[in-house]
Amino acid sequence: MTADDAVPQPVVLIDQDSDRDATIVQLSFGDRLGALLDTMKALKDLGLDVTKGSVATDSSVTQTKFHIMRLGRKVEDPDMLETIRLTIINNLLQYHPESSEKLAMGEFFGIKAPEKKVDVDVATHVIVQDDGPKRSMLYIETADRPGLLLEVIKIITDVNVDVESAEIDTEGLVAKDKFHVSYRGAKLNSSLSQVLVNCLRYYLRRPETDEDSY
């Protein structure tokens, strides 16, 4: 086993669907995570109510689940959801610095940037599928970066599409997100779906240097 193989893939999953009242966060980093008291404190310092749920072990992966509420309800604000995501990842980088090379955020906040970069063009996939008559499911997979969730939600709302719920999954260097979306209370038609897909593909594949080159 190489040294690279020895560092497990960190996974942070924010689930807005499975619990009616709370935002569920699942966190795993092989079997290396302890009680995560510092992570719970950091989340509580954001003004959130945090309770630790189940801890499940599957082969060599220990998965810890948190239930998070704000003012008695699940967290709906995209800014706060991204803050939760970055807070958890920053704590992971602080207390498990070896995770730095396995996280896109390691390049920005960690001690060691990932040696393997994700090719945005290759890694970016955007799909819209019907999910009943009143909503559609939007799947996005792309290279992770700070602020990604806010960018995605802004693009969605800029084309007048409503985000009903989300599952935000950070798997190492890649973000894999699912959004339930609708337009005026109905699923997206084919033309609006194509507009949304094209907009997301364009912005997600755009080099970060674009804005500086004009």
Image (tube, grey):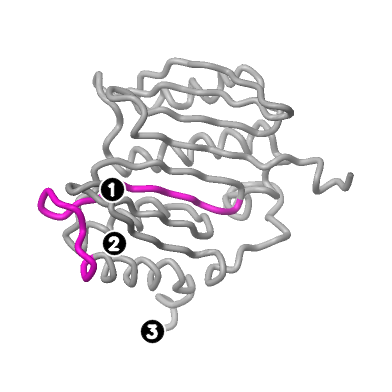
Q: Nearer the viewer, mark 1 or mark 3?
A: 1
Question: Secondary structure beneath disc 2?
Answer: helix
Local crowd size for mark 3, using a 10 Å CA cut-off: few (<14), some (14–19), many (≥20): few
Local crowd size for mark 1, using a 10 Å CA cut-off: few (<14), some (14–19), many (≥20): some
Question: Secondary structure beneath disc 3?
Answer: loop
Q: Is residue 191 magenta?
A: yes
Q: CA distance from mark 3 to mark 2?
A: 21 Å
Residue 167 horizontal/vertical position (percent): 40, 41
Residue lying furthest left: 184
Residue 164 horizontal/vertical position (percent): 24, 43
Q: Which residues are magenta?
A: 173-192
Badge 2 or badge 1: first in the primary sequence: 1
Q: Is residue 86 magenta?
A: no
The image quarter in which residue 17 lies:
top left
Residue at 12% x, 48% y: name it: 185
Residue at 50% x, 55% y: name it: 145
Residue at 66% x, 20% y: name it: 34
Q: CA distance from mark 2 to mark 1?
A: 21 Å
Residue lying furthest right: 1
Q: Nearer the viewer, mark 3 or mark 2?
A: 2
Residue of label 2: 155
Residue at 22% x, 48% y: name it: 135
Asked whether the residues under the numbered discs 3 and 2 touch, taking CB atoms below 8 Å apart as contact, a structural biologist would say no
Above or below residue 153? Residue 70 is: above
Asked whether the residues under the numbered discs 1 and 3 touch, taking CB atoms below 8 Å apart as contact, a structural biologist would say no
Above or below residue 70? Residue 192 is: below
Residue 99 horizontal/vertical position (percent): 68, 41
Q: In the image, which disc is placed on residue 214?
A: 3
Asked whether the residues under the numbered discs 2 and 1 touch, taking CB atoms below 8 Å apart as contact, a structural biologist would say no
For the residue marked with disc 3, what is the amino acid? Tyr
Residue of label 1: 131
